[in-house]
Amino acid sequence: MQLIFKLGKNPLLSIAEIYSLMESKNIKFEVIIANKQILFIKLQSVVYIDILIKILGGVVEIFQVESIVDKEDARRIKTSEKINIDNTQFAYGTNIVKQNIKDFERKELDKPYVEAKNGMLPSKLAKIMLNLAITQDTQTIYDPFCGTGTILIEALIQGYRVIGSDISKDAVLGTKKNLKWASEEYSIQNKSEVFVNNASSLAEQLRNKDENISIVTEPFLGKSWSKPVQKNVRNAKIIASVDKLIQSSIRSLSKILKNNQRLVIIIPSFKTKHDIIYLKAREMEFGNLKKISIIPSDFLFENKLVNKLDKFDYYREKAVVRREIFIFEKF
Ligand SMILES: C[S@@+](CC[C@H](N)C(=O)[O-])C[C@H]1O[C@@H](n2cnc3c(N)ncnc32)[C@H](O)[C@@H]1O
């Protein structure tokens, strides 16, 4: 079976998501062509692309390839039944599935509890991060800064047991409401647990848990930043406290992870008028956690996509808060 994945706005992130998903489901594949628009792969087994497209967040379309034709022959094929591979070759196929944008909008707009002041994590990104965190043994997803539960909703829909915590009682109550809403909307019966906790200390509820927990989270950003950050003492203090909170949270969260389980975390950077403020947490090593890129390095090299990959960007150039996604694995 040959498939072409049409990649979203962040092609490397989309490719990493596909690699991670395939690995977690133990689906073997080989890459035929990769570029910034598509990932063209060959699989030994048959997969259901209508299910794959529902799981993936960073893939716009999946195209099942029947044959490859040159540019000349492609002219005779309907636009809806072909996809451009590299301007000289086209793929022909009739089984094509597209991402359901309305479903993302529904989850963002229809859930009962929203909290705009913390910045809204797009459901699409929550889904991508979740897929980057899941391994073959993952049973439970934990978000220690759960806010409105965007990440947990995605995990619940994918069939995982979910645990959330937040320092704010309102966020805990709100996440409970949102998870109840998602369970009803998507007819799910998985278990969930949400409680108040400061992410920098290990929650009692999580001590000595037997299950394999993966952690997916977007930490506290200090405040809602709408304009480029002014360099002054107050902002420097806020950013230093975010840095400290993220560092201490990563240290305490690493205790929850069993070997080979992952922590996928956004570490923010902040745009000022002339430069970018980066957190120290971004460069730090955390004991028995190692940063991984998921995409094999020979793949990156052969396809000349990037030289070094230790994080994934998810922001627009003008954004004040720049989200960088780091994947840690416990060893
Ligand atoms: C950026 S928001 C997360 C938003 C979330 N991804 C969502 O989908 O709504 C950060 C959250 O961290 C919480 N928070 C702030 N400091 C915390 C701490 N020390 N421990 C745990 N949660 C904290 C805030 O209450 C807020 O809900």
Image (cartoon, grey):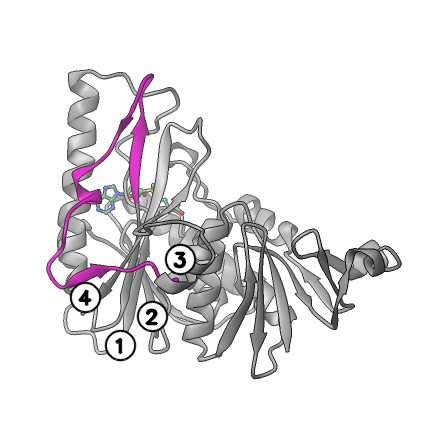
Marker disc for residue 230:
none
- The image position of residue 153, as x and y in percent, is 45, 58
Residues drawn in magenta: 267-296
- The image position of residue 117, as x and y in percent, is 39, 32
How far separated are the C-alphas under marks 3 and 1? 37 Å
Compared with residue 267, is residue 211 higher up or lower down, i.e. above or below?
A: below
Q: Secondary structure at mark 3?
A: helix
User: Per the image, is 177 magenta?
Assistant: no
Q: Residues within 10 Å of mark 1 (few under 14, many from 20)?
A: some
According to the image, label 2 marks what residue? 140
Marker disc for residue 211:
1
According to the image, label 3 marks what residue? 301
Q: Earlier in the sequence, mark 4 or mark 1?
A: 1
Q: What amino acid is at disc 1?
A: Glu
How far separated are the C-alphas under marks 2 and 3? 34 Å
Who's the residue at 27% across and 40% down the image?
220
- Where is residue 32, by image quadrant? bottom right
Who's the residue at 34% across and 29% down the image?
224
Please give left or right for residue 238 compared with residue 220 in the image. left
Q: Earlier in the sequence, mark 4 or mark 3?
A: 4
